Image (spheres, rainbow, N blue to C red):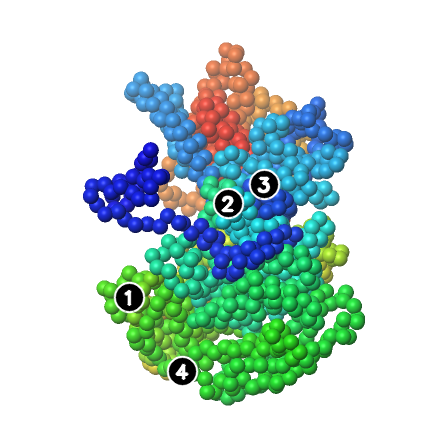
């Protein structure tokens, strides 16, 4: 029997026979050959690091008996390969969310007849199957979309819009349009009620278009019910959204029950729960991205029926700890990291052997910081191996992230490597290239001289991702993928060591990995560290040297005289024209040294032989080290070195057993720059895939930008294989590589050959210019490139500040390298206002926030109130703590913005530039928390200001002049000028005129923007510097016309007293409100004494309105009295005037405006009362008369203002409702909602949707009510 398959191979059809190894040719064409043996083993590489040979040799050492903690975005327990271990145990044994983004605050529930009233407003029926001996329940409410990762939220929003909203909305719009068209055909010349009906249809269509244009979907929320069944805590999420709890899954705490739920069939998002009854918190654990599941799968996935898909350690168990906060996209926070560390050092339910953390940022320094110190404790005190990704910010040097760059070198930093087999299987490359680091893998050394990258490992894999991605596997690459490879290797090692009862420590494992790694030929040390890990060799090393005295010892190396706590010698931006002496201190520390017995410390003594392969480093030969800090001196002589980077290390060998490798090492890195004038060129440089050329150039003093030009020598032959990364970095003390001077660009020379690339530089410092051919860009190319330096510098430095009160600002501009044309421009783009907290409190946190043994963490909560006058984009900035995370002395600085109804709007954390919030006009509260275990530290921050930056509607420019006098008289502005080489030219910036400033200026308010100096387009683009302009109080304008009080100076004292008493009584008339006889008597008295004074009647109307039982008839009668006192014709005549030339025009206008206000209020109060009377008397004959009165009042109001005017909109809505003009009512209610959202107005919208039978709008707005009007702020 022959089976036919259709293949697209040179557009021919071939037939295969399962019984024959040949195929039949069709159409007489030659058959294309192909390889049917797919390299499945290389999709998740294991051969490169010896894992397969190790497992073939020791099949039971496959991670069994080990626990891996994945500090990441969360792991999906339902993802393929993450259910069981190789020996049938539960794979994921704990799921925990350290961020707080999944927290639900709980309150006691009221139960009546087996029904709970949920916070969403739904009635929750308690299933009969539930067991609750106490009968006590706790409830909370959670937004579904707040649990969604960004990718899933976007998919579900798109699905809802396209499949649920759009079909119903388009149908409704079409039906309403047909109704309007039919009405117009039946009423070609409408008037009166017909015209009003037509307008209502038009309003309906307008509203449908508005709802489509401003469509917003907050998603549903579900109620949460928590109780104790007598044995354990249980939780149920009402994912039926109807209170039918029997249809929802009842969950237990994950590590006790391994219960996993799915939020819906459509989203496929897995979740689990934890309960903290002492803190009244339900923790819903999910994922903020697919990253963590992929990482866990590399480390430990297990496919019993498809072992080729296994991770490195299929026998290991996993603890999933989410450190990526969903509120921030997926960024980690100090809170999540500290909670994660607390979880793993508890060791009550399990003992974690190794942590994988494929996360990190770039810290400004590594020598201090609370998080770094706590991370060090996890390794150095609790003995947990910690593996971290090195970051993906290469290829320039010193781009390693944090971690591993923390206060100690105990963590294992990993670089990313790609093997030839990975290239073929994962990336489908046409050619197999030699193995190499990925181009983007970060390089050492760290800024403190340590290597940062300890080892390298395969940095790509095709393996499992969460089910919400709707795919089983995916290719991901990065040092994030290299780290779990090493983590899996560590699990294999520990599994074997435990099985053989071989003692080990995090320090011995790290040393074994480093000493047994295979150093890759032709690959620089900064990318690979000690080389590509080899698990079998590392295991042999650990077994062979298990009894060495330094097994449980780490060696803390510091360089005493080279800056803030250096851990290696790093001569960069240091003189290299003469030798330099360095004092090296080494201090041994036992694992958990405080608990280590005295005998071990007394006996510890190791005689070391020091070695260094570089002739330019002179060292002592021997070093005797006991349990104390000791030092030795080395001499580094860079004078004979060529320009470039040079690396070596000082290795300390145990003189008794040197074959085990170095006990510790001191990295030595020397950067010797080229000295250039204004330009340097490099001709005909050859590049193959992955090749790197590093040029270290001492940037000339006075340079402020550089221009790089790259020429592809053979465009026709090489253009398709010319993908490059250009990476230029200048390091600045205590600023990370990204915050210093950095330029990074991926270019295709086919499109950008000879295109100048301009970037900012800092004169007087070394710049690394790194050109790299992309690792997968096949073929060899030849390029020539040149770098030229230019510059215009200011005497004010790189940040310019100007205070409006200090008058004209002078800047002296200098062109040091060449004659330059300048055309200075100051552009202000943001208005920044500082705010002090309106309230603060310091509270001790709950059980998740206690560091063993009993170190209580406190939280400072700060509330800031601010107002947005017009919809805009804001950037909150807690400037005291900003741009620091791992290096900060505090744990967290998470902020959240809420509107006046406590609806969550946006959140941000350590890096303000990453977070903006789009806000509509209104009042807002920013809530900020800062954490620390020392309460007195937090007390110092209780008055800390926060900056709120608002984007200006249009940028503001400052006027710049060539002379001080011209600036003083605001004369001829400076458009351009020439600065001869080596000379200085002053420019003068004048303050803003008052009309360009805000009418109300708060204390400390300023504008922020940029200043540029150059006329040259390239220099202007990259040569921009921050510019702050501090405002002063706006001038107070005086009115030249007489005020009303001045015009009344002719009155005698008695007359003034009578009027003052009258006005006082009027005020109290309103305040007394429904006080009955007292208010009525005062009104009658005032009416008798001042019958023509309109405010008396208006105050009486306001008092009647406030009564609990409103007297509608009295309201109408009082309004009529007020209306009789107002000459409507006179008002209409006045507002019909184009201009008023009378002498007392201002006074007349003031009187008319007051009367207009009184008129509108009286009309509206009367109209509202009549609307209510109409609804109660609708069945009676007189209701027709009332309806006509309502219409007349509406028409009178419309003569003065639009019906949507906020002063009359309430009456307009009721007038439309009594006429069943729901379209008009909806439009005006929507206007109220836009002006100031309230639950009452939102519910009115829903009622109108129901009246119009727009069920899709009713559902969408209805399910958002609990989210828009929560009872409390979202917890931190």
Q: Is residue 222 visible?
A: yes
Quickly name the residue at label 2: 306
Crowd around label 2: few <14 · some 14–19 · many ≥20 (10 Å): few
Dot placed on the residue nearer the N-terminal end, 3 or 4: 3
Q: Position of residue 931 (x, y in %)?
A: 66, 56
Crowd around label 3: few <14 · some 14–19 · many ≥20 (10 Å): many
Q: Residue 76, labelled with which disc? A: none
Query: Mark 2 or mark 1, which is nearer to you?
Result: 2
Dot placed on the residue nearer the N-terminal end, 2 or 1: 2
Q: CA distance from mark 2 to mark 1?
A: 48 Å
Q: Residue 271, labelled with which disc? A: 3
Crowd around label 1: few <14 · some 14–19 · many ≥20 (10 Å): some
Query: Mark 3 or mark 4, which is nearer to you?
Result: 3
Quickly name the residue at label 1: 753
Quickly name the residue at label 4: 675
Report the front residue among 381 and 81: 81
Answer above or below: position of 1085 versus 353: above
Dot placed on the residue nearer the N-terminal end, 1 or 3: 3
Dot placed on the residue nearer the N-terminal end, 2 or 4: 2
Question: Is disc 1 placed on a helix, strand or loop?
Answer: loop
């Amino acid at each position: 029997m022959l089976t036919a398959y259709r293949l697209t191979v040179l557009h021919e059809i071939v037939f295969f026979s399962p019984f024959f190894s040949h195929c039949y040719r069709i159409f007489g064409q030659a058959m294309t050959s192909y390889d049917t043996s797919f390299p499945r083993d290389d999709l998740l590489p294991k051969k490169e690091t010896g894992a397969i040979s190790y497992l073939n040799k020791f099949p039971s050492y496959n991670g069994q008996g080990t626990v891996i903690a994945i500090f990441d975005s969360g792991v999906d327990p339902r993802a393929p390969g993450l259910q069981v271990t190789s020996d049938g145990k539960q794979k994921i044994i704990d799921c925990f969310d350290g961020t707080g983004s999944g927290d639900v605050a709980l309150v006691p529930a009221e139960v009546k007849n087996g029904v709970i009233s949920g916070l969403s407003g739904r009635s929750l029926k308690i299933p009969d199957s539930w067991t609750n001996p106490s009968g006590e329940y706790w409830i909370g409410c959670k937004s579904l979309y707040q649990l969604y990762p960004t990718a899933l939220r976007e998919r579900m929003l798109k699905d809802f819009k396209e499949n649920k909203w759009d079909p119903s909305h388009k149908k409704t719009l079409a039906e309403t349009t047909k109704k309007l068209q039919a009405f117009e055909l039946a009423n070609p010349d409408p008037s009166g009620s017909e015209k009003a009906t037509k307008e209502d249809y038009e309003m309906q269509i307008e509203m449908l278009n508005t709802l489509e244009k401003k469509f917003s979907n907050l998603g549903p929320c579900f109620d949460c019910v928590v109780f104790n069944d007598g044995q354990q805590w249980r939780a149920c999420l009402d994912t039926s959204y109807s209170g039918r709890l029997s249809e929802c899954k009842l969950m237990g705490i994950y590590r006790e029950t391994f219960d996993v739920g799915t939020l819906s069939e459509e989203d496929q998002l897995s979740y689990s729960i934890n309960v903290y009854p002492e803190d009244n918190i339900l923790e819903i654990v999910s994922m903020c991205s697919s990253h963590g599941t992929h990482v866990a799968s590399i480390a430990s996935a297990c496919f019993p029926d498809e072992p080729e898909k296994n991770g490195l350690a299929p026998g290991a168990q996993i603890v999933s700890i989410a450190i990526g906060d969903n509120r921030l996209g997926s960024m980690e926070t100090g809170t999540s990291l500290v909670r994660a560390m607390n979880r793993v050092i508890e060791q009550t339910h399990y003992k974690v052997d190794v942590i994988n953390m494929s996360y990190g940022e770039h810290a400004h320094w590594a020598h201090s910081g609370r998080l770094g110190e706590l991370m060090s404790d996890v390794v150095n005190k609790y003995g947990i191996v910690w593996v971290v990704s090195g970051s993906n910010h290469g290829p320039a040097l010193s781009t390693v992230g944090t971690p591993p760059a923390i206060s100690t070198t105990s963590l294992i930093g990993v670089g990313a490597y790609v093997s030839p087999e990975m290239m073929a299987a994962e990336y489908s490359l046409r050619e197999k290239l030699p193995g190499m680091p990925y181009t983007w893998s970060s390089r050492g050394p760290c800024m403190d001289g340590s290597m940062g990258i300890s080892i390298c490992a395969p940095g790509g894999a095709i393996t499992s991702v969460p089910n919400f991605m709707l795919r089983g596997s995916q290719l991901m690459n990065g040092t994030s993928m290299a780290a779990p490879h090493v983590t899996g290797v560590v699990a294999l090692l520990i599994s074997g060591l435990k099985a053989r009862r071989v003692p080990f420590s995090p320090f011995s494992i790290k040393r074994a990995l480093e000493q047994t790694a295979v150093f890759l030929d032709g690959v620089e040390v900064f990318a690979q560290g000690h080389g590509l890990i080899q698990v079998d060799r590392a295991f042999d090393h650990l077994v062979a040297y298990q009894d060495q005295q330094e097994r449980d010892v780490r060696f803390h190396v510091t360089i005493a005289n080279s800056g803030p706590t250096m851990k290696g010698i790093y001569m960069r931006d240091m003189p290299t024209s003469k030798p330099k002496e360095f004092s090296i201190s080494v201090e041994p520390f036992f694992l958990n040294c405080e608990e280590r017995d005295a005998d071990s410390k007394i006996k510890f003594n190791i005689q070391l032989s020091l070695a260094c392969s570089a002739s330019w480093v002179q060292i002592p030969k021997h070093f005797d080290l006991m349990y104390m800090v000791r030092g030795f001196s080395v001499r580094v002589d860079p004078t004979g070195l060529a320009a470039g980077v040079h690396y070596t290390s000082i290795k300390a060998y145990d003189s008794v057993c040197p074959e085990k490798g170095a006990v510790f090492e001191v990295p030595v890195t020397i950067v010797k720059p080229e000295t250039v004038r204004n330009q340097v060129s490099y001709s005909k440089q050859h590049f193959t895939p992955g090749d790197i050329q590093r040029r270290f150039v001492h940037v000339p003093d006075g340079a402020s930008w550089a221009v790089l030009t790259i020429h592809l020598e053979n465009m026709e032959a090489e253009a398709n294989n010319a993908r490059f990364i250009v990476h230029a970095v200048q390091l600045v003390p205590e600023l990370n590589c990204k915050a210093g001077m950095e330029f990074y660009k991926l270019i295709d020379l086919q499109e950008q050959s000879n295109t100048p690339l301009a970037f900012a530089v800092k004169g007087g410092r070394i710049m690394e210019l790194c050109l790299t051919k992309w690792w997968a860009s096949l073929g060899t190319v030849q390029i020539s490139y040149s770098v030229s330096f230019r510059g215009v510098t200011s005497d004010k430095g790189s940040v310019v500040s100007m205070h409006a009160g200090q008058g004209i600002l002078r800047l002296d501009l200098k062109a040091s390298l060449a004659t330059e044309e300048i055309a200075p421009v100051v552009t202000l783009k943001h208005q920044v206002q500082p705010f002090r907290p309106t309230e603060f409190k310091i509270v001790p946190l709950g059980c998740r926030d206690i560091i063993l043994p009993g170190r209580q963490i406190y939280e400072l909560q700060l509330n800031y109130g601010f107002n947005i006058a017009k919809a805009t984009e804001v950037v909150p900035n807690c400037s005291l703590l900003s741009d620091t995370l791992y290096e900060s002395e505090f744990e967290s600085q998470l902020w959240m913005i809420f509107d006046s109804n406590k609806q969550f709007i946006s959140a941000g954390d350590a890096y303000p530039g990453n977070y903006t919030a789009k806000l509509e006009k209104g009042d807002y509260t920013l809530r900020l928390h800062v954490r620390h275990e020392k309460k007195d530290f937090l007390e110092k921050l209780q008055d800390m200001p926060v900056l709120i930056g608002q984007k200006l509607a249009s940028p503001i420019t400052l006027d710049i002049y060539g002379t001080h006098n011209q600036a003083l008289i605001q004369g001829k502005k400076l458009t351009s000028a020439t600065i001869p080489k080596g000379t200085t030219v002053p420019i003068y910036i004048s303050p803003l005129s008052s009309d360009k400033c805000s009418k109300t200026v708060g204390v400390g308010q300023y504008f922020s923007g940029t200043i540029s100096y150059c006329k040259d387009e390239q220099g202007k683009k990259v040569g921009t510097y921050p510019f702050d302009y501090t405002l002063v109080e706006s001038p107070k304008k005086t009115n030249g016309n007489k005020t009303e009080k001045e015009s009344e100076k002719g009155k005698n004292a008695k007359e003034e007293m009578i009027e003052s008493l009258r006005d006082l009584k009027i005020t109290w008339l309103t305040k007394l409100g429904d006080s009955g006889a007292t208010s009525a008597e005062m009104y009658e008295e005032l009416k008798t004494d001042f019958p023509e004074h309109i405010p008396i009647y208006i105050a009486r109307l306001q008092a009647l309105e406030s009564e609990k039982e409103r007297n509608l008839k009295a309201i109408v009668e009082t309004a009529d009295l007020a209306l009789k006192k107002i000459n409507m014709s006179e008002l209409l005549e006045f507002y019909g005037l184009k201009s008023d030339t009378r002498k007392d025009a201002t006074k007349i206008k003031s009187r008319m405006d007051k009367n207009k206000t009184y008129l509108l209020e009286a009309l509206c109060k009367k109209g509202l009362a009549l609307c209510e009377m109409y609804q109660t008397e609708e069945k009676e004959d007189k209701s027709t008369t009332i309806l006509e009165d309502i219409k007349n009042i509406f028409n009178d109001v419309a003569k003065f203002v639009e019906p949507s005017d906020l002063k009359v909109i309430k009456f307009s809505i009721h007038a439309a409702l009594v006429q069943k003009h729901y379209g008009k009512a909806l439009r005006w209610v929507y206007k109220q909602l836009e002006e100031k959202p309230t639950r009452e107005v939102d519910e009115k919208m829903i009622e109108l949707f129901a009246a119009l039978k727009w069920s899709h709008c009713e559902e969408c707005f209805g399910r958002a009510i609990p989210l828009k009007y929560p009872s409390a702020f979202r917890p931190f």
